[in-house]
Image (cartoon, rainbow, N blue to C red):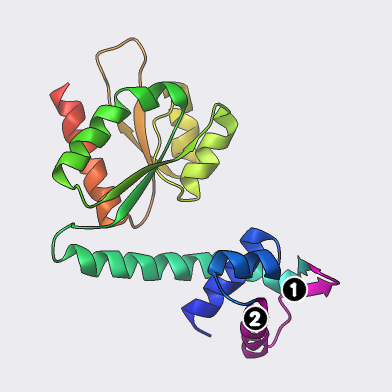
Amino acid sequence: MDVRQLEYFLAVVDHGGFDKGAKALSMAQPSLSQAIRTLEKDLGSQLFHRIGRRVVLTEAGRALIEPARQVVRSLAAARASVAAVHGMVCGSVAIASMPSPAAEPLSSMIDHFRDRHPGVEVAIAVESEHREAFLPLVLKGVGIGVPAEAWRTLAERAGALVFDLDPPASLHLALVSRKGWLSPAAAEFLEIATSYRRGL
């Protein structure tokens, strides 16, 4: 088993089939199918039920999803950590925010971050007006977010890290990050965001 096979497996899962997964990976569908068969042989278990052109995850396939995501994330983390030794000249950070805080102070924080690290890509990964979708996205590692204070207790109970921004406004905001390893770009953004808060 290698990381590439796990990336192929996740592409089939995330795109709903071998054809779409192959297209997302820019590879031929037969090559992707063969890679998955090799992975299944190595694991000694079938990962997908093949029903015509459709595929459905087996119980073993469902069990593999989260470990596979962890391995792929860990490899990306290792690459980013090594690259950061030579200075943060590249990388990416994804931020999830509800619409109102995304305008301010988040936009100013991003501007400050880009001034210091112009080679790092910053993306507002998900903007949702549905508050119920916000916390699960942060906990799944989509990015960080600025929720309303009312969500603080729930976020902390769910295992998220909550940082006070405390802007001089009637609306209280907080910076939320998932627990565990953060990419160098994300950690630097949190540092800049915290410094920005102190300067308010």
Closer to us: 155 or 102: 102
Residue 132 found in image quarter: top right
Disc 2 marks which residue?
A: 36
Estimate the x, y position of residue 175 in percent, counting from the top left: 34, 34
Task: Identify which amino acid the numbered label 1 is placed on.
Answer: Phe
Q: Are marks 1 and 2 in contact (CB under 8 Å)?
A: yes
Left or right: 157, with 11 as reference point: left
Label 1: few (<14), some or many (≥20) within 10 Å? many
Asked if residue 66 is positioned above or below residue 179 in the image, the reply reads below
Task: Identify which amino acid the numbered label 2 is placed on.
Answer: Ile
Label 2: few (<14), some or many (≥20) within 10 Å? many
Q: Residue at x 30, y 69 (%)?
A: 79
Estimate the x, y position of residue 186 in percent, counting from the top left: 29, 49
Residue 67 shows in the view: no
> Mark 1 or mark 2, which has the lower sequence index?
2
Closer to us: 118 or 101: 118
Estimate the x, y position of residue 165 in percent, counting from the top left: 28, 27
Disc 1 marks which residue?
A: 48
Looking at the rendering, the stretch of residues picked out in magenta corresponds to 29-54
